[in-house]
Image (cartoon, grey):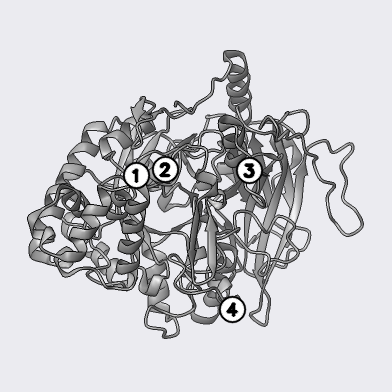
């Protein structure tokens, strides 16, 4: 089946016209003038777990699908993305990249090992058997019990080198600067005792430089500091540039944004500097849950419970349950607050993180978005029962419907090239979405006024302030509070906008961290007001679950605002980021129920408010 939908020419013309008016491109050279959409986290059959889960598509099909071509999925279905992406990172696991292909092919060096022979046979058996083999592989890797043959450098290195060069050549052949960009990368998959410390490694460079190395994997070391050393050596030896992106912190059981290093020692200033140097971004949302914040961490935030169902009870492989004191190390908002506290204590902020979204799909198909979700892996491609699948271990259960549809990364850059996209990521001029393609701008300064919204906000924002990802230095002219430009345009085929919020975090004189969410702009302001407790009237709900439809009769196509922090203290370091919320729309299990004529599973969440998270703007007092 082809999961896509058409946009009327008239509607698209209106949307593009509105976008041009709201986000004009008359900016100075070097400024980001366009938003580019992409996926920074995708697996193909070159990843061992993906191929055991049934993936049969490689990087070539991944690039073809992302640019808009019709492909056959691993389960034989027609698949075509509804709107092509601008860029893609195929990020297969570095750990034995390509060796799963040899396992499927029955490489004699593997077949001598009884466990690998059994996995091979299971891969050729029923889908249930293949999935069981994949789960066993993931568990063996997480618990450092891989069969010796799969971990033997003499066997693996030749396979890895061949597949790596094949991947680089394929990526180069699909790279079309200005039209479709293939960024080279891979996933470093550190999973100590099942706790997710994964990083996506992305290069600015082409194959001429990247081809001089083999991916550094967690089989060499599970300590991310060793990865940073490898990245430093790469830049020194090749003259290239590279960065790493932590992802899926919600499954790390407190380790991803820990106050300690990998060995459990308190973080030092040197460690913090190196982490900030190599990891400027973090993945805040993807198929395996949303990691912005959590009800336990942000009890006063009424939108604090997006995408947690099933994902906040344990670590990646459900080998260890979650404890409440772990949560602060799992979620990005807490990490941003910890970063301010650490900077006050040791002089460096290791968690000065821009935010991106991605899919983490393991079937080579970058299909984020509820209506067009093509699944996490081959076994969850469209079908009548995929929402009802069950993963159980140690009394913990995850259901298929708890998967999110994945996220996308939006990059503000002046052109669609490797260099421009990478440089924008490095300066954090990026934002995350949960699959929607709403357009979001965010600038901070000291003298923005309401009249600035009537002109070209990009020109004003760059000339008199800093964009998302930037640092707002103390105002030396007066003691006024900072002002911010917020502007959002709806996804042309998605839900209208409910509201724009500013999430603020700060550190007081005692070193304690705080947070607050401000409703800044909202639809239908003539009828929607804040009550005496500051809570805004809900936007409403037009979802019809019997048809899996919604109506854009509520909400707004565009929202914008000049906002001044009413509680600003010039002595307190702070961060600010925007959370843009759409009106309620159906989730993918609701679309599946109608498409396949099945009854949704009891308890399944069938609608939600999709959203975007900007990278923060940081305020730094004069020292």
C-alpha gap between disc 2 and disc 1: 6 Å
C-alpha gap between disc 3 and disc 1: 34 Å
Which of pointers 2 and 3 indicates the residue nearer the eye?
3
Q: Residue at x 9, y 61 (%)?
A: 155
581, 137: nearer the viewer: 137
Instruction: Provide the secondary structure element on which disc 2 rests.
Output: strand
Label located before the other in sequence (4 or 3): 4
Q: Are marks 2 and 1 in contact (CB under 8 Å)?
A: yes
Outermost front residue: 126
Q: Residues within 10 Å of mark 4 (few under 14, many from 20)?
A: few
Label located before the other in sequence (4 or 2): 2
Q: Residues within 10 Å of mark 2 (few under 14, many from 20)?
A: many
Where residue 239 appears, x then y in whole percent? 20, 54
Label located before the other in sequence (4 or 1): 1
Where residue 426 appears, x then y in whole percent? 41, 52
Q: Which residue is mark 4?
A: 325
- Residue 615's place in the image compared with 620, above or below, is above
191, 338: nearer the viewer: 191
Q: Which residue is mark 2?
A: 39
User: Does residue 134 appear to the left or right of 403 in the view shown?
Assistant: left
Label located before the other in sequence (2 or 1): 2
Q: Which residue is mark 3?
A: 600
Q: Residues within 10 Å of mark 1 (few under 14, many from 20)?
A: many
Outermost bottom residue: 265
Which of pointers 4 and 3 indicates the residue nearer the eye?
3
C-alpha gap between disc 4 and disc 3: 34 Å
Q: Which residue is mark 1?
A: 89
Where residue 317 appears, x then y in whole percent? 43, 66
């Amino acid at each position: 089946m082809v999961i896509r939908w058409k946009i009327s020419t008239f509607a698209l013309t209106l949307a593009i016209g509105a976008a041009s008016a709201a986000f004009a491109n008359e900016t100075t050279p070097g400024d980001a003038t366009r938003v580019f959409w992409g996926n920074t986290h995708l697996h193909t059959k070159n990843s061992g777990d993906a191929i055991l889960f049934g993936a049969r598509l490689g990087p070539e099909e991944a690039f073809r699908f992302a640019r808009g071509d019709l492909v056959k999925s691993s389960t034989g279905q027609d698949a075509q993305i509804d709107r092509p992406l601008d860029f893609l990172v195929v990020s297969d696991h570095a750990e034995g990249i390509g060796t799963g292909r040899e396992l499927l092919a029955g490489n004699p060096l593997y077949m001598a090992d009884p466990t690998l022979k059994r996995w091979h046979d299971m891969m050729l058996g029923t889908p249930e058997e293949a999935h069981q083999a994949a789960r066993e592989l993931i568990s063996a890797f997480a618990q450092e019990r891989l069969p010796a043959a799969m971990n033997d450098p003499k066997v693996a290195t030749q396979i890895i080198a061949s597949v790596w060069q094949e991947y680089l050549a394929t990526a180069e052949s699909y790279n079309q600067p200005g039209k479709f960009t293939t960024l080279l990368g891979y996933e470093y998959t550190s999973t100590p005792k099942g706790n997710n410390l994964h990083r996506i490694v992305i290069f600015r460079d082409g194959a001429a430089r990247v081809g001089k190395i083999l991916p550094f994997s967690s089989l060499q070391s599970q300590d991310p500091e060793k990865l940073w050393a490898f990245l430093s050596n790469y830049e020194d030896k090749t003259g290239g540039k590279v960065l790493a992106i932590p992802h899926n912190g919600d499954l790390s059981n407190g380790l991803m944004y820990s106050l300690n290093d990998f060995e459990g020692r308190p973080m030092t200033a040197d460690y913090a500097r190196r982490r900030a140097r190599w990891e400027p971004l973090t993945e805040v949302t993807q198929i395996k849950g949303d990691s912005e914040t959590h009800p336990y961490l942000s009890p006063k935030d009424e939108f604090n419970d997006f995408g947690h169902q099933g994902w906040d009870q344990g670590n990646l492989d459900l080998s260890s349950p979650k404890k409440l004191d772990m949560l602060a190390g799992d979620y990005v908002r807490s990490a941003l607050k910890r970063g301010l506290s650490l900077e006050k204590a040791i002089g460096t902020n290791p968690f000065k993180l821009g935010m991106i979204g991605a899919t983490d799909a393991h079937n080579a198909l970058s299909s984020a978005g509820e209506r067009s979700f093509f699944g996490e892996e081959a076994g969850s491609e469209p079908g009548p029962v995929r929402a009802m699948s069950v993963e159980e271990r140690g009394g913990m259960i995850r259901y298929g419907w708890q998967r999110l549809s994945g996220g996308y990364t939006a990059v503000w850059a002046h052109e669609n090239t490797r260099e421009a996209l990478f440089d924008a990521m490095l300066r954090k001029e990026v934002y995350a979405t949960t699959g929607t393609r709403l357009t979001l701008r965010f600038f901070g300064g000291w003298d923005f006024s309401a009249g600035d919204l009537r002109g070209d906000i990009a020109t004003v924002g760059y000339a008199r302030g800093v964009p998302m990802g930037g640092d707002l230095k103390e105002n030396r002219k007066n003691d006024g509070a900072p002002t911010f430009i917020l502007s959002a345009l709806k996804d042309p085929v998605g839900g209208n906008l409910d509201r724009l919020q500013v999430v603020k975090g700060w550190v007081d004189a005692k070193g304690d961290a705080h947070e607050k969410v401000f409703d800044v702009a909202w639809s239908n302001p003539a009828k929607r007001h804040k009550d005496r407790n500051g809570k805004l009237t809900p936007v409403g709900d037009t979802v019809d679950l019997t048809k899996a439809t919604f109506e854009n009769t509520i909400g707004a196509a565009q929202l914008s605002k000049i906002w001044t922090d009413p509680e600003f203290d010039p002595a307190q370091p702070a961060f600010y980021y925007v959370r843009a919320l759409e009106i309620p729309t159906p989730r993918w299990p609701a679309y599946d129920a109608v498409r396949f004529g099945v009854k949704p599973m009891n308890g399944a969440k069938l609608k939600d408010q999709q959203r975007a998270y900007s990278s923060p703007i940081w305020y730094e007092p004069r020292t």
